[in-house]
C-alpha cells in the first residue's frame, strides 16, 4: 500500500477472480465459460480489415450493437446500455444509485462482487441468508427500503426464481430499484426484460460471457427505463466514454444476431447439464437444481476443498468457496459432453482411490 | 433523469467525446487518431484461432502484455497496470487517491476529462490558468498541497514541458502525487518513466490509442511505484477485474514489440506535422509549437467556430472548443500527408471564397 491511498479504501477487500491458468493443461470447469467457440459469424465479423480499423476510436454509443440488442429483446435503443463486461455495468449501477443512504440488499450467498461494490461505494453491506434449501427467500426483500440485487439464476447455487417472484420484488419495492443480474438466464430461466414495460424500478443486467461464448471479449449490458439508462450514461461518460472496443462491438452484434447457433449451444449445454447431474447423483452426490451453465454439487464423504484438490491433482479444475454453507460443495461449469465424461471418470477415480 | 440517481450526481456534467461520424465521408482530423493502421504484427496476432478463444476469459492480470510494456520501458512488471483505455486508468487513479481532502490540481486548459473526474469524485475542481503564451506555469503547481495532473504534451495546445520541469514538479511536491498524462509523448516529447527510479510520487499514464494506432482497441496503462500500482489494482479488482479483453491484450503486445513499425509511423507523423505547420503559417495562421500528433491553429480573420464549420462543410472534420481563450483556434489532428494536403487545399478554398 502506498501512503497516498485514501483512507476509506485501506480496508477494501477486492473480488478474487477464479483461477485462470495460462497454460491449457486443465479441463477447465471453474469460471463458467462456454465449451463452444463464439458463432462463426463472430469469426467472420472480426476480419483483418476490421483489425486495421482499430486505428479509429469505437463508437462511444456502440449504436449498431445497442440496436441489435434492443431489437432482440423488443425494447427501444434508449433502454439499453452496453459495458466492458457486466461487472462494469454493475459498477456503474452501484455508482449511480447507491450510497450510504441508498444501500443495496442481496443474498448472503450470491455473486461475490455485490459486497465488494458496496464496500467500494462505502455503503454498509447488507445481505440476507438463503433459506435452508439454498433458495432465495423473496419475502425477506420486500419493503426493506433498500435497492435489491438478485442474481437469477443465483450463483453458485444455480437456483432460479420464477418471473412471478421477480414481479413481486418489483411490485413490493416501488420507489426502490430491483436489479436482476441475469448472467445465466439463457440456460433455462425466464428473463425479466418483458417486465420493464410494467415496472420502472427494474434493471436487468446480462452478459455475453456465458451463453454467447464471449467471456474474453468483455461485453455486458443492462436494460431498464430510458431515464435509468440516461443516468447510467451520465456515469459512463464521466468515467470511461469509449468503454466498448470496436471488435467487441462487432462480435456482440454478430453473436446476438446468430440466433440459430445460440439456440443450439444453449440446448446442448442444458442437455449435458442434465446428463452430468444424473451421473453425479448416481455417485451419491447432492446437486442443487440448476438452471445455469454450472452445477453446485457436494458429497457426504468429502468436503468441497478435498473434492476441488483431488480433481485439480487429476487435471480437472472446478471452483471451491471457502465460506460458510458452501464448504460442502464445488461449483462445476458445464463443459462439453467429453469434458463432463472426463469429470465423472475423474470423480470416480477419486472415489476408488481415496488418499 | 430517473428518481433514483443519487443527489451528488444530479449536476454532474459528463465528458463530451469528439464527433464520431459512423459514415466515412469525412477527412477525419478531429480525434487524434493515427492515419496508419496498427502494426502488421497486430493483424497477424488477431487470428481466427484467437477469435475462437474468446469463449475463455482474458487474463485479469494481462501478464504477457504487462511484461512486454515493462520490458520496453525497463521497469518491473509490478510497476505497470493496464486498463481499458487511459481514461479508465485515470478514473482508477482519481478513485484511489483523490477525495475532498486530497484534491487534484491541473491546467485550466487541458484534457477535458480532468474536471469531470473531479466532479465524479466530489472534490472541488481546482485549475490553474495557462500563461499568456499558452504554456503551463510550473511554479504555480509547486507545494500547493494537492496532487498534480499534467498532460504532457498538453491538449489541445500540443505544447510540451521538458523533463527538467516534470522533475521539478515531482521534487517540489513530495508527499503529493504528480500524474503525468503522456498520451501524446511519442511525437517529440520525453517520457518521465525513467524518473520513476527517483520519485515515488510520480505516476505516468500512457495510451496505445495514438502512436500505436489502437484507439479502437481501448488500451492504456500507467507506470508508477509498486505500492501505487498495488493500490490501483485494489480499485480495479473492486470495479472491473477483467478490464482488458483478450484481443486487446494480444494487439497491445504485438504493437509494443514492433518497434520498427512504431518508429516509422511516429517519424512520418512528425514530418507531416512540420509540413502542415509551415503551410498553415504561409496562409497567415498562428500555430502553437506542438510536440503532439495534432496542432492548435488559429487565424486572425476568422474564429475557430467559423473555421470548423467551413472545413466541415467541405468534408474535413477538425475540433473546435467553445471555451475562453480557445475560441480563436481549431485543433487539427495530423493525418496522412494526403489528408493534410487536402486540409491545406480546403483552407485555401475557404479563404478564397468567403461566405
Image (cartoon, coloured by chain):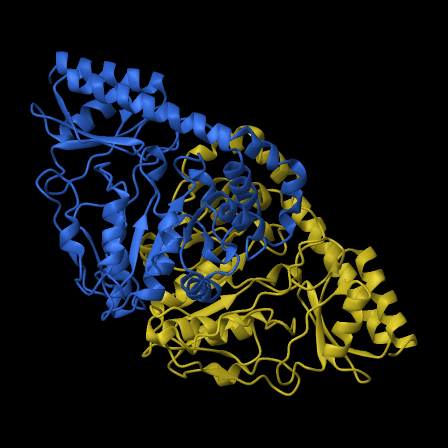
Chain colours: A blue, B yellow
Looking at the picture, tell me which residue is in the foreground, B320 or A249: A249
Picture quadrant where residue B92 is located: bottom left
- Please identify the quadrant where the C terminus of chain B is shown: bottom right
Picture quadrant where residue B171 is located: bottom left
Left or right of residue B228: residue B208: right
Picture quadrant where residue B348 is located: bottom right
A136 is higher (above) or lower (below) than B174: above
A119 is higher (above) or lower (below) than B99: above
Residue A112 x/y as whole percent: 24, 47
A51 is higher (above) or lower (below) than B190: above
Outermost residue on the right side: it is B352
Residue A288 x/y as whole percent: 18, 31
Which residue sits at x=48%, y=40%?
B246
Left or right of residue A27: residue A165: left
Residue B330 x/y as whole percent: 71, 74
Residue B343 x/y as whole percent: 82, 64
Which residue sits at x=79%, y=62%?
B315
A163 is higher (above) or lower (below) than B33: above
Looking at the picture, tell me which residue is in the foreground, A335 or B347: A335
Amino acid at each position: 500500500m502506498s501512503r497516498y491511498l485514501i483512507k476509506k479504501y485501506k480496508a477494501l477487500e477486492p473480488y478474487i477472480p477464479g483461477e485462470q491458468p495460462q497454460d491449457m493443461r486443465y479441463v477447465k470447469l471453474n469460471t463458467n465459460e462456454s465449451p463452444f467457440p463464439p458463432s462463426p459469424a463472430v469469426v467472420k465479423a472480426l476480419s483483418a480489415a476490421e483489425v486495421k480499423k482499430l486505428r479509429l476510436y469505437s463508437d462511444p454509443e456502440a449504436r449498431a450493437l445497442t440496436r441489435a440488442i434492443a431489437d432482440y429483446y423488443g425494447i427501444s435503443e434508449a433502454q439499453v446500455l452496453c459495458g466492458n463486461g457486466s461487472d462494469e455495468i454493475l459498477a456503474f449501477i452501484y455508482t449511480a444509485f447507491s450510497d450510504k443512504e441508498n444501500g443495496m440488499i442481496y443474498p448472503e450467498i450470491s455473486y461475490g462482487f455485490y459486497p465488494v461494490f458496496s464496500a467500494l461505494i462505502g455503503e454498509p453491506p447488507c445481505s440476507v441468508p438463503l433459506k435452508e434449501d439454498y433458495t432465495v427467500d423473496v419475502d425477506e426483500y420486500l419493503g426493506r427500503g433498500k435497492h435489491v440485487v438478485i442474481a437469477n439464476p443465483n450463483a453458485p447455487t444455480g437456483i432460479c426464481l420464477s418471473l412471478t417472484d421477480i414481479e413481486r420484488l418489483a411490485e413490493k419495492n416501488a420507489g426502490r430499484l430491483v436489479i436482476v443480474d441475469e448472467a445465466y438466464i439463457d440456460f433455462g430461466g425466464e428473463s425479466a426484460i418483458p417486465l420493464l414495460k410494467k415496472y420502472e424500478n427494474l434493471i436487468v443486467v446480462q452478459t455475453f460471457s456465458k451463453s454467447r461464448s464471449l467471456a474474453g471479449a468483455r461485453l455486458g449490458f443492462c436494460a431498464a427505463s430510458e431515464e435509468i439508462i440516461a443516468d447510467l450514461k451520465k456515469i459512463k461518460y464521466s468515467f470511461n466514454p469509449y468503454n466498448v472496443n470496436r471488435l467487441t462491438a462487432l462480435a456482440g452484434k454478430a453473436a446476438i444476431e446468430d440466433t440459430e447457433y445460440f439456440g443450439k449451444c444453449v440446448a446442448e449445454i442444458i442437455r449435458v447439464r442434465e446428463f452430468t447431474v444424473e451421473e453425479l447423483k448416481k455417485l451419491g452426490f447432492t446437486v442443487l437444481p440448476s438452471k445455469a451453465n454450472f452445477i453446485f454439487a457436494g458429497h457426504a464423504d468429502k468436503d468441497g476443498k478435498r473434492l476441488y484438490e483431488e480433481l485439480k491433482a487429476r487435471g480437472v479444475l472446478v471452483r471451491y468457496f471457502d465460506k460458510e454453507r458452501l464448504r460442502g460443495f464445488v461449483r462445476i461449469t458445464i463443459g462439453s459432453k467429453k469434458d463432463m465424461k472426463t469429470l465423472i471418470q475423474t470423480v470416480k477415480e477419486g472415489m476408488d482411490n481415496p488418499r
